Image: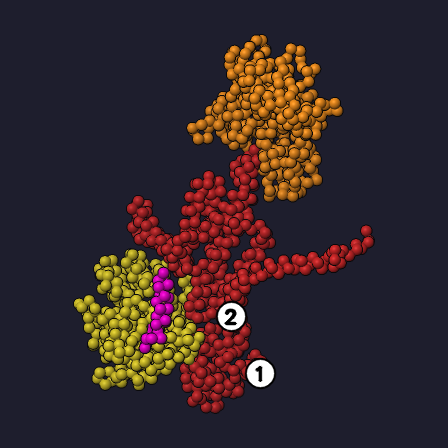
Chain colours: A orange, B yellow, C red
Amino acid sequence: MRHGFRLSQFKENVQENLPLHGENGVATETRANDFVVFDHVQKSYDGVSLVVKDLNLTIAKGEFLTMLGPSGSGKTTCLMMLAGFETATNGEIRLDGRNINLVPPHKRGIGMVFQNYALFPHMTVGENLSFPLEVRGMGKDEREAKVKRALDMVQMYSFINRRPAQLSGGQQQRIALARALVFDPSLVLMDEPLGALDKQLREHMQFEIKHLHESLGITVVYVTHDQGEALTMSDRVAVFNDGKIQQLAPPADLYERPENSFVAQFIGENNKLPGVIEELSEGKALVRLATGELIDATPVNVTAKGQKTLVSIRPERVEFKPEMMPPGAHMIGAEVIEVIYMGDILRARLKVAGSDDFVMKMRNTLGQTKLSPGETIRIGWHPQDARALEPM
Amino acid sequence: MKKILTLSTALTAVAFAAQADVTVMSWGGAYSQSQLEAYAKPYTAQTGVKVNMVDADNPATPVKAMVEASNVTVDVADVEYADAIRLCDEGMLETIDPAMLPAAPDGTPATEDFLPGALTDCAVSTIVFSTVFAYDTSKFPEGPKSIADFFDLEKFPGKRAMRKGAKANLEMALMADGVPAADVYATLETPEGLDRAFAMLDKIKKDTIWWEAGAQPPQLLADGEVAMTTAYNGRIFAAAVAENKPFQVVWDGQVLEYDLFVIPKGAPNLEEAKKFVAFATDTQRLADQAKWISYGPARKSSGPLVGLYQDGKTEMGPHMPTSAENLTNALPSSYEFWVDRDSELNERFNAWLAAN
Amino acid sequence: MTDVPPLLTTADGRPLKAALASAQGRARRKAFYLVAPLLLFVVFSFILPIGQMLHRSIYHDGFSSTAPNLSAWFAANPSGTEPDEAAFAALAADLAEMKKNKTAGEAATRINYTVSATRSLFTATARKADKLQPPFKEALLAEDAKWGEPVIWQAMRAASNPYTTDFYLIATDRARGADGGIEQVPENERIYLWLFGKTFILSGLITFICLILAFPIAHLLATLPMAKSNLLMILVLLPFWTSLLVRTTSWIVLLQGQGVVNNILVSLGMIGEDGRITMIYNQTGTIIVMTHILLPFMVLPLYSVMRTIKPSYARAARSLGATSWTTFRRIYLPQTLPGIGAGALLVFILAVGYYITPALVGGADGQLISNLIQFHMSKSNWSLAAALSGMLLVGVLLLYWLYDRLVGIDKLKLG
């Protein structure tokens, strides 16, 4: 990651400002520097079912918050309520301490980047950028200066007289970004802005957006269904499912410490081993799998002995060399079914505890042991990496 | 739909025309029916020659097309005066020698028995129809009596309807303004006379609806859209007698026109066609036709023979445009005047109409 | 880089360009065979008739073909020559010929188009033409003094050439004076130019009303959920599926003095029995009914354009700080311009040529130029009808050109 250094540096700054969170990352009280607040927000389109069930979320000034989730999870609806295109059925949305439930979208002063860019096709790039300034009654000179500044920011000033149709997807995206920023909003919403771009361009734009966020100090609420994007860009990620926030946490926490099986499943690749809690002690759990073997795990939302559980382990945290294991760790037999060569890593599919979709990733280093199908090995992991979750 | 029907009947008729001995093209409806009853049936009964009736919207149009294409399938056609003259001038009709027409029962030769102008080089008149004005008796119990009343909105308030065109309207306007029928055309030929006619029309222009098809005026009257309308007398008669509408015709200031039989050049059965025309236009046949429709016979000698309408109780005499009592202030339409001034006067009429 | 690139050849040594041309030529020929039937159809059913119509507007041989002698005299003597005995002799010979061939009516009709009250002059004189004796000038003048009038000689001279601008003169309310100059007809006979203007203004007004009415409907159609918009679409298209006459007659039933609308207003006490509103058989009737009939032609192109305008544009504009009115004016409206242009052009062109509706409900002041075209066709004055149609065609093409210059024809979107 080209911007890895900067990102981590910035994250530290922000983390100090983060509000206090309850059990599920739910704000228990609002504080002065809570910039955006969703307070018990509910949304229903048909009066029968809730699309957003009970949303409580606070976003700090300068934060980059991503709403991540599958389609239909309610994330876009939340964004639209914040932008003012949808009204909350119940609850309150506050921006900078002010209730904005009844404020029309054009008075909210929120910049927005749309999935399909929504650049006005009948206007040139310059006119597109000038538009928000014109409707604010800004003078011509000031407008031109601001447009130039915004276009320079995305290195697109030479395109000022082009029409959107004459630009590539990536260029349009930059213009859309510049347009959302040109009137200096303190909050910018982005609705899957990179969805239409190819992989390489997308990664590049992620970097640029992140860079702009950092240099301008704006607050960004970003909606995506791409977990990679969410993890690389955000200060915090809110994982949405079924109209609720499943987990609200910084990317590393989300990846390494998913709090329920949905998050574990949704973020990254995961091996799931069903079993029953055999022993439960301070921060440690012993799980008996269906085939009778015992494994170590960290209890997350399991509470009692004898409870059913789903143990989730990241493929890259699975080890088969005994010297890599922590002392005293349980090991379990596995049969290699196939090994797939993927360049930087090797991916082995194993039969573990009766199921044959257990995946283990190995770095393709010089001295890596070559496994071959049919071979029987013993695998294990650090108990911290195996998380015993309540099955969904 | 009606057009398609007309067309298909025309086509069928044309297909069978080869077998028929005489094919007659007319206007359809009650009018064709009257010709069938009064002319064709007796002719077939008498001579055994079959008569085939064919309908057209205006027979002059297909006749012209047929002659131009040299594919004439019609032996006799019923046309309006202007068309009869025009087609004749353009050499599209057979000439008809008046000598071949039967004399009146009292021996008066045809040339004298027919009304003035009823015989032309190529055509023999059958009936006289008239443009009259009519009103709804339920609206005016003390109804208008003269053509001047039609133009008098104060005495007889209410909407008027007139045909959209200069012909007959200008004449009626002048008569309403007190010009005697005999002087109408002489007056209209002068610019002052023309202005006088238009000035008269100006009086009612605001309150007038302009009709185009002959079926419209009785409808407008029946709907209560207008209080008075000009109309072809047969249409009002049909509505009043056959449909019992409270319509009254005012004969004062009526404008009379002929309908005529012509024989297209190249008619397939020329001799039979001539015989049929001679038979159909004799005194009795013309008188008989009045049994079926209230148009007047073109022969003087037919007048006294006109009897009852087909319902067996309506005396036709008073409903005929040619009855003596209806002719006190009547004007025969002048063909010469109208062929010469048709385009000029219609242009002026259209300009007048369109101006607000 | 001044080097001329070497001539490229195909593998078997033919020049590449020639090979390409022959390969593409085959494809082009095939394509041509495919469109040939349509091309023929268009040529025979569209281009030829229109060409013929335009030709008729400047060609009438009713006089030139029936009066060869006089035409020869006109050809030999320049305009302005006083008609001499030779001219009258030629006229007498032609009239005799007309009597023989029964063509006096044709010749008379042609002259009567430009000089009123001359038809009987020809037909009456022709009837006695074989009795005329020299000197012909005296003989003819004795027959009818009108034969000495310069206006008639002017008209005959003009008509002796089958190619004539006379019909365009009439169609622009002008006529040839006695001295051969072109002058306007008396004011109370001027109708065509005024009616052209009125036709264009009324059509413009109808187009505008259609636009105002169609815009929200089309917007609804484009934004409602499918099921509802389909139902609405059916309602919009319903007039299409109803016979024109039925629709027009229904309007008469609704709007006439004793009609439904007036009856309702009277029974509600909003107007008195004497205050019945005249909504039909006048200009208002023409506007109402034509607007109704032409509305779908505005809705459909608008709808097809609006359907492609994503709602995100409006949202973007709103999020950028525009009020809903500004959003409509600056963002939505400009994007519907291609549809507005197409719909307006379509409705306008249809309105300009509409004739049945104004004929049925237009009364006196709701007539359009097409009604006069029809009038002259029914009077067999094809040439004048053609000249008027030609002017209408030019007018429409002019507007089309203007539209191309102002908006750009490539922006037209018909569906």
Pick the residue in front: A4 or A315.
A315
Furthest residue to the left? B313
The percent position of residue A152, horizontal first and vertical second, equals: 70, 34
Note whether C47 is above or below B259 in the view shown: above
Residue at which label 1 appears: C76
- Within the image, what quadrant is residue C18 found in? bottom right
**Which region is colored magenta?**
B1-25
At a point 51% along the width and 64% down the height, the residue shown is C45
x and y, in percent, of residue C259 in the image: 32, 52
Q: Residue at x 25, y 66 (%)?
A: B237
The residue at the point 48 percent across, 88 percent down is C136
Assign a secondary structure to mark 1.
helix
Q: Residues within 10 Å of mark 2 (few under 14, many from 20)?
A: many
Residue C93 on the magenta span = no
Residue lying farthest bottom?
A: C134
Q: Amino acid at mark 1?
A: Ala
Question: Per the image, is B14 magenta?
Answer: yes
Real-space CA distance between mark 2 and mark 1, rounded to the nearest whole angstrom: 26 Å
Q: Nearer the viewer, residue B235 or B159?
A: B235
The image quarter containing residue B102 is bottom left
In this rendering, would C39 be left or right of B62? right
Main secondary structure of the magenta stretch? helix
Height in image: A179 above or below A33? below
Q: Tell me the residue at 47%/65% (across/down).
A: C190
Who is closer to the viewer here, B220 or A199? Answer: A199
Q: Earlier in the sequence, mark 2 or mark 1?
A: 2
Q: Is residue A297 visible?
A: no
Q: Is residue B35 visible?
A: yes
Left or right of C297 in this view: B163: left
For mark 1, name the chain.
Answer: C
| Residue C213, position as x, y percentages in the image | 45, 47
Secondary structure at badge 2 equals helix
